[in-house]
Amino acid sequence: MNSFKKNKDLVLYLSKNDLKTKFAGSYLGIIWAFVQPVVTIVLYWFVFQIGLKSPGVSNVPFVLWLMAGLIPWFFFSESWINATNCFSEYSYLVKKVVFNIDILPVVKIISSLWIHIFFVVVLVGIYAVFGLFPGAIALQLIYYSFCMIVLVLALSYLTSAIAVFFKDTLQLVGIATQIGTWVTPILWNIDTIDLNEKLVMLFKFNPMYYIVQGYRTTLIYGTGFWEQKELTIYFWVFTIVIFAIAFMVYRRLKPHFADSL
């Protein structure tokens, strides 16, 4: 956190530059960052609502319910994967003694955050168009976005440090995000399927369940996060523990980064 405060301007500059260079050379440029999520949403909508006839949730069209889960997941998965590879991608900076490499995972996460902010605004706007604007409680999405940033930051410091020495980490994180799409769950409604209570609890142990459900309950039901005390406490305890583990691992491995890259 101190590293970010001291290098705030540099972090913001690098995050914007990272977003631009990611699509440098393509005809559409940064537009591709918006096209891919939209195509994914349309594809899932077609398969699940048109093909499989998935019903809406609480009189909310299925596509709106789907978007409320996919949009936070897009940010989580993209930022975690990109941050995991940050030290290898910016190896030339890691090898500079004077450069503070602690900010690199933050740069990757903020780079993805710009796109996420756009889609959250669009999401709320679409709910409003359908006459489902939740009111002032929509500001709670800022809280859930903050939760997600803290979670992915904790995971990223852990996996990015390990990835310097174990290159397969990036592929493992990619697989984890693929599995996470189904076990969060994002594409199906846990409340409409007859599941064993223990299995339901297992799904809820996934910290992203708290965030995805938070987006949905905010937009669909106008439920405050303080009304989900147990899940809120669990999420923050889990995240703090991961942060503590990540900090110890990162601090121990950091002195050897330059030699291994």
Image (cartoon, grey):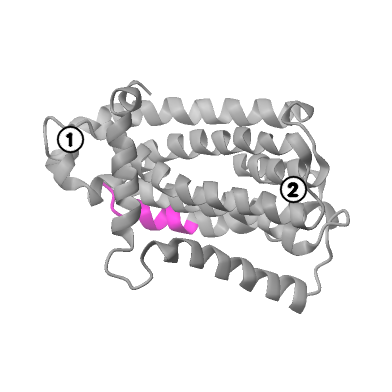
Apparent side of residue 238 relative to residue 222 in the rendered image (left or right): left
When asked about the image quadrant of residue 250, the answer is top left
Q: Nearer the viewer, residue 119 or 74?
A: 119
Residue that badge 2 annotates: 199
Q: Position of residue 216 (x, y in %)?
A: 73, 47
Which badge, 1 or 2, is on the more N-terminal residue? 2
Apparent side of residue 82 relative to residue 207 in the rendered image (left or right): left
Residue farthest to the top, as pictured: 2
Rate crowding at label 1 as few (under 14), some (14 to 19) or many (20 or more) other CA atoms within 10 Å. Answer: few
Q: Which residues are magenta?
A: 165-175
Q: Secondary structure at mark 2?
A: helix
Is residue 173 within the magenta segment? yes
Which label belongs to residue 256?
A: 1
Q: Position of residue 30 (x, y in %)?
A: 39, 61
Q: Is residue 28 above or below residue 126?
A: below
Q: Nearer the viewer, residue 203 or 188?
A: 188
Q: Is residue 104 above or below residue 37?
A: above
Q: Position of residue 151 (x, y in %)?
A: 51, 36
Is residue 48 within the magenta segment? no
Q: Residue at x 69, y 70 (%)?
A: 45
Q: Residue at x 65, y 29 (%)?
A: 234
When asked about the image quadrant of residue 141, the answer is top right
Amino acid type of the residue tagged 1 in the rendering: His
Q: Residue at x 50, y 67 (%)?
A: 35
